[in-house]
Every structure is written in structure tokens, then in C-alpha cells.
Amino acid sequence: MARIEKRVSVKQKTFSGALPFTKLNYQILSAGILCIIFGYIALAQDPWNGTMPLVVAPILLVLGYCVIIPIGILFRKNTNAEVTAQPKEISSENSH
């Protein structure tokens, strides 16, 4: 007997051609980079055992690397396509 082969169709995602980052994403990323730069500037201040290098600089660096940059990468605005894709409720006025 011959074997019956099952073909599985693979659905491919279509590429819309739009860039994934918007202007707001780039603004958030640039704010994160500025925060990191200010953190390194605070780290280079004299005296080395002062408040700026030991307290402020680590806070700015962690905030930049672990909070602001990931928010800039992951942030996505709701688009009209996502909002209109939800089913609309039928009102009692339209059913007459």
C-alpha cells in the first residue's frame, strides 16, 4: 500500500513594509541615551567617594539601561486597526 502524505500548510506573516519604531519610540530611546550619558558624567566627578559618583550615577545608569531603553523598544501605540477589529455591539435602535 502507498503511504498517504499529509501536507501541512505553513502560514507566513506578511510584512507590511512599515518600520516598527515611531517618532515617539525614538524620543524615548534618545531620553534613555541622555540619561546614560548623564550617569557616566556623574560617575566621573571628583571626589570619587562623593554623592554624585556613588549614589546619583548608579541610579541614572540603572534607570537608563533597565527602564527607559526597554520602554523605548517595547512601547507600541494602539492603532485604529486594532480598535476597529473588536466586534461592535448591536444597539436596539438598529434592530428595528
Image: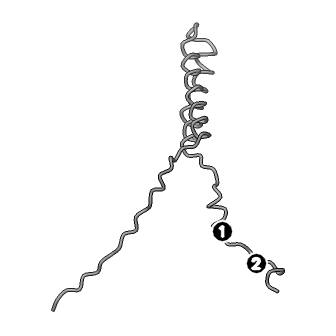
| Residue at point 63%, 55% (across, down) | 79
- Quarter of the view holding residue 94: bottom right
Q: Label 2 is placed on what type of residue?
A: Ile
> What residue sits 19% from the left and 86% below the top?
3
Disc 1 designates what residue? 86
Above-or-below relation of 63 to 90? above
Could you say whether the residue bearing mark 2 is in a helix, strand or loop? Answer: loop
Q: Where is residue 9 shown, x and y percent of the image?
A: 35, 73
Please tell me whether mark 1 sits on a helix, a strand or a loop. Answer: loop
Q: Between residue 81 and residue 32, name the one nearer to us.
A: 81
Query: In front here: 96 or 35?
Result: 96
From the top left corner, tell me how far across and down residue 4 is, in percent.
Answer: 23, 86
Local packing at callout 1 (Cα closer than 10 Å; few below 14, some 14-19, many 20+) is few
Image spot of residue 32 (x, y percent): 58, 31
38 relative to 16, above or below: above
Is 87 on the left or on the right of 44, as rendered?
right
Q: Quadrant of residue 71?
A: top right
How far separated are the C-alphas under marks 2 and 1?
13 Å
Residue at which label 2 appears? 90
Task: Check if mark 2's residue and mark 1's residue have beta carbons within 8 Å.
Answer: no
Quadrant containing the N terminus in the rendered view: bottom left
Q: Amino acid at mark 1?
A: Gln
Q: Quadrant of residue 8?
A: bottom left
Query: Residue at image x 62%, y 61%?
Result: 82
Q: Quadrant of the C terminus?
A: bottom right
The scheme the figure's colours follow is one colour
| Up-down relation of residue 61 to residue 71 (above or below) | above
Residue 77: % across, % down? 63, 50
